[in-house]
Amino acid sequence: MKIVKVEVFKFTTPKNTGENVSRGPGWPTDLPWAIYPDIIEHMKHIPNLAGGAAVVKITAENGMYGLGSTGLYRQAAEIIEDHLKPMLIGLDCEEIEYIWHLMYLSTSAWGRAGLAMQAISAVDIALWDLKGKLYNQPVYQLLGGKVRDRIKVYATGLAFEDYRDMGYKAVKIPRPYGLVDGKEGMRKTVKCIEYVKKVMGDDTEIAIDVWCAWDVEYTIKLCTMMKDLNIRWIEEPVPADDYEGYHRIKDALNSMGILVSGGEHEFTRWGTRTLIERDCVDLLQSDIWYTGGLSEIRKINALAKAKNLMLVPHCHGMPVFHFSVSSLTSPFAETLLFNQITEPSRLFLGEPKVDNGFIDVPDRPGLGYELNYDWGPCIKLSE
Ligand SMILES: [Mg+2]
């Protein structure tokens, strides 16, 4: 079935005012560059940091279409429009493995990771959605079928009372304080974890997402202070390239019963293989929208399974849910709630609601979603 049309949409979200409008009160501003306080004000006004998305719609000759996206860095839209789209027209949309390899080779001189891999991810996700529709099957069936009936989910965010009321038993907290906050920040972090346990219950599973913003010494010292608080994992404690730092942290934290996760900011099987081979993590959190789409996370999944690691993809949405429900290495999944508890504004319509800490994956054909054109200001790059 030939690809006859590729449409590319670039969504923008309101400029970041520094008030964390979309993420709720208390969302940390101590991103990795916070070690340079003079630059913080400047960084707040770079629109990329406020999100946005690139979306691709791929139509086959029978009129059916698939949708794929990549978030946060909408410039991937230009790569799809200028480089991938001319190549895709006329190809057989069912030959996803061949198309992935072609996209990878054609961008490898300047790609292999970053925006180029995000563009490839969006196209790959759209092709899986389209294939599911062509076969009248949900994508999880194409991925091997369900290995569990429902997906247990954890909440990421700071609205602990709401998560408790929604039935969540697990939460991931964006680091409340960072390197610039020193020892006082460490003490406040401990108090924050104690508060979470008080609100959500002592048995609540707790993780802390550092988003690459700490270093080895800080991480080990703080985790030593928290060793009796039953933290399940620390996520991305150091920059993604710091494999040695990861390994040293994993050594120290494992002895306290704390796991280390990483991979959200890593790309493809090759980047992730380095994290695995250098014994950096217990838990992989590759992002389907960054790492190379559903095709690539299947390969990463095989690496994870061979090493007896968990692979719980970063972020949420239909591609994650279809993957997780069909993956033996993914016993649970993430739901990003921020402060949008009641009815989150989503780029795609049709996402399942959380039911007492679980999600049911819909059995509609493909990924079972539709683009929400009203999500934010949208530009269609061309006809
Ligand atoms: Mg993360």
Image: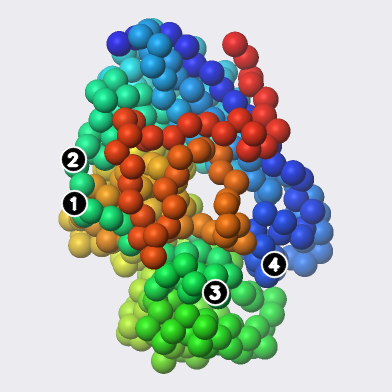
Name the residue at 50% across, 64% down. Answer: 156
Q: Which of marks 1 and 4 precedes in the sequence? A: 4
Residue type indicated by callout 3 = Phe
Q: Spatial distance from mark 3 to mark 2, Cα to Cα? A: 35 Å
Q: Is residue 130 visible?
A: yes
Residue 292 image point, x, y percent: 40, 38
Residue 121 image point, x, y percent: 43, 35
- Circle 1 is placed at which residue position? 147
Residue 282 quadrant: bottom left
Q: Which of marks 2 and 4 precedes in the sequence? A: 4
Q: Spatial distance from mark 1 to mark 2, Cα to Cα? A: 9 Å
Q: Spatial distance from mark 4 to mark 2, Cα to Cα? A: 41 Å
Q: Which of marks 2 and 3 precedes in the sequence? A: 2
Q: Spatial distance from mark 4 to mark 3, Cα to Cα? A: 12 Å
3 and 1 marks in contact (CB < 8 Å): no
Is label 2 in a helix, a strand or a loop?
loop
- Circle 3 is placed at which residue position? 160
Is label 4 in a helix, a strand or a loop?
loop
Q: Which of marks 1 and 3 precedes in the sequence? A: 1
- Circle 2 is placed at which residue position? 144
Residue 278 quadrant: bottom left
